[in-house]
Image (spheres, rainbow, N blue to C red):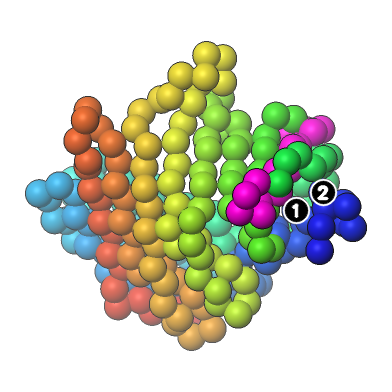
Amino acid sequence: MTVTQISAQELFQAAYQNRYTWDGNFPGYTADITYKYDDQVIKGQVVIDANMKAEVLNVEDEAAKKAIHGQAWEIAVHRVRRAFEQTHGANTFRPGETDATGAVEIFVGGKSEGDKYKVRNNEVCHVHRLIHGTFVTIDTFSSHDTGEGYLSHTYNSVYHDPETGAQKGGKSDFTDEYEKVGNYYILNRREIRTEIAERISIQDFIFSNIELLG
């Protein structure tokens, strides 16, 4: 299948709909969290309810609580199932180049003018989006095939100033692992390696004893 046979929107929409998301019956879940950051180890609990609201319990350190909540929120927001029209109905799509790996560049117009994606093997492998006034670029290198859609396994992210193009902060490398609990795939570990002042800072979020609510 080539871009000449289908439109850029069809290519992108197929990859969008191939993402793994939780269905409308998702009940939410609880999990124990072990957060390792450099030489710190902090334990607590997280709850993500059926409405995708995240809560962190029994963590007193405010910086750690904020970091854990940020990851719990990320988990939930990326599993929400939204129709393509709801998310991208005000956008237009046009194809760009196809690179040596077969990834097809897709430029966005309309409401999200300036955003860019790449699609390869029915998966979005590159994201370049303006979020809260900053360009976020994410490249995905491997994924988990759940049989019900794909989940990113290894990927990196970097931020740039939209005016100057200057990089903001260090690049982060992610490794995500999942387990199936009931009918749902749920993140059980995320390692983040970030370049900070010529050293690598490592954050490890380990979710255990995952139990569905209800």
> Which secondary structure lies at badge 1?
helix
Asked whether residue 17 appears in the rendered view, the answer is yes
Given the image, on which type of amino acid does mark 2 rest?
A: Ala
Q: Residues within 10 Å of mark 2 (few under 14, many from 20)?
A: many
Q: Is 92 placed left or right of 71 in the picture?
A: right
Which numbered disc covers residue 154?
none
The front one of 154 and 74 is: 154
In magenta, the rendered stretch is: 99-112
Q: Which residue in the protein does label 2 denote?
A: 8
* Disc 1: CA contacts within 10 A as few (<14), some (14-19) or many (>=20): many
Would you say residue 185 sits in the magenta stretch?
no
Query: What residue would you read off at disc 1?
Result: 12
Q: Position of residue 200 (x, y in %)?
A: 22, 41
Q: Position of residue 24 (x, y in %)?
A: 65, 72
Q: Residue furthest top?
A: 164
Image location of residue 40, percent across then percent down: 12, 50
Q: Is residue 208 left or right of residue 133?
A: left
Q: Residue furthest right?
A: 5
Q: Residue furthest left?
A: 39
Q: Is residue 104 magenta?
A: yes
Q: Residue at x 81, y 58 (%)?
A: 2
As displayed, is residue 6 above or below residue 201?
A: below
SS at mark 2 in the image: helix
> Which sits in the foreground, 95 or 75?
95
Task: Depth check: give the residue in front, 121 or 130.
Answer: 121
- The structure residue drawn at horizontal position 55% and vertical position 74%, both measured from the top left corner, is 145
As measured in the structure, the alpha-carbon distance from the residue carrying label 2 to the one carrying label 1 is 6 Å
Q: How many marks?
A: 2
User: Residue 14 appears in which quarter of the rendering?
Assistant: bottom right
- Looking at the image, do the residues carrying marks 2 and 1 touch, with CB atoms under 8 Å apart? yes
